[in-house]
Every structure is written in C-alpha cells, then in structure tokens.
Amino acid sequence: MEDFKNRLLEYIESQLGVSQREFEKRCGLAQGTITSIKIKGPSVDVLMKISNTCPNLNLNWLVAGRGSMLMKEQRNQITPQNDIHHNQQVVIANWEGLKDVLEEVIKEKCQKSANVL
C-alpha cells in the first residue's frame, strides 16, 4: 500500500498543489486517512470520494501503477460542480478500467496461490 500512498501524494503535490490535509478535506475524508492507507490500504469508500472529487485522476495508475496519472492530457484541477454529467462519465470510465485491473490482479494472486499448494 506504500506505492498507492506515494502515487496519491505525487498526484496531490504535482497536480493540485495543496496539502495532504486540504486534499482530505476537499474529498470529505477524515484527517489522517492518507496516512492510514499505508497500514490498511484504501477502502472502496475512500476510492469513491477521491474519484468523485478528482475525476481525471486515473484510478488504474493510482491503484496499480498502470497507465498515466491523468485520464486526459491536461493538468487536473478539483472539478467544480458545473459539469456533473461529464464528471459522471469520466468516473464511470475510470471505475470500469479499475475493475479490469483488479480482476487481473486477483487472477494472478489465485494462480500464485494454486502454485504454492
């Protein structure tokens, strides 16, 4: 989970230029959430809040380190609520890509477990 946390901090610093605490506030996360990710990993709720607040952040990159940081070739800003429909489409595409990555990771882990047995 250290890689996830480091990628998230990289995104916050390079794309948003805000503090970790300010990012947590904007996403509706409890103080210290990002710090605790190193220990217990991100919950689905945390991923949803981050994705809803920053729809151009590529969750495949954030979770698995695959692809580019951003869904689009532009600097990301926390999105205002004036384009909700577009944001929803981006979030849906992001989650569909993440689902594929997670299925692949689970399949790899199952194969490794089967080889151990």
Image: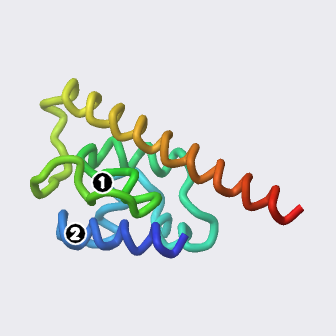
Q: Give the farthest residue toward the top.
A: 85
Query: Of helix, strand and loop, which one carries label 2?
Result: loop
Taking 104 as reference, is 109 above or below it? below
Mark 1 or mark 2: which comes first in sequence? Answer: 2
In the rendered structure, which amino acid carries the disc numbered 2? Val
Q: Residue 45 location, x and y as percent?
A: 52, 45
Task: Locate the N terminus and report the quarter of the image it occupies.
Answer: bottom right
The residue positioned 18% from the left and 44% from the top of the image is: 79
Is mark 1 in CB contact (under 8 Å) with mark 2?
yes
Count of numbered circles on the image: 2
Please state if 73 lies on the left or on the right of 91 as rendered.
left
Residue under label 1, please give it.
26
For the residue carrying disc 2, how many other residues have a C-alpha within 10 Å: few (<14), some (14-19), or many (20+)? few
Disc 1 to disc 2, C-alpha distance: 10 Å
Q: Quadrant of residue 21?
A: bottom left
| Image coords of residue 70 (percent x, y) | 23, 54
Read off the residue under disc 2.
18
User: Dot 1 surroundings within 10 Å: few (below 14), some, or many (20 or more)?
Assistant: few
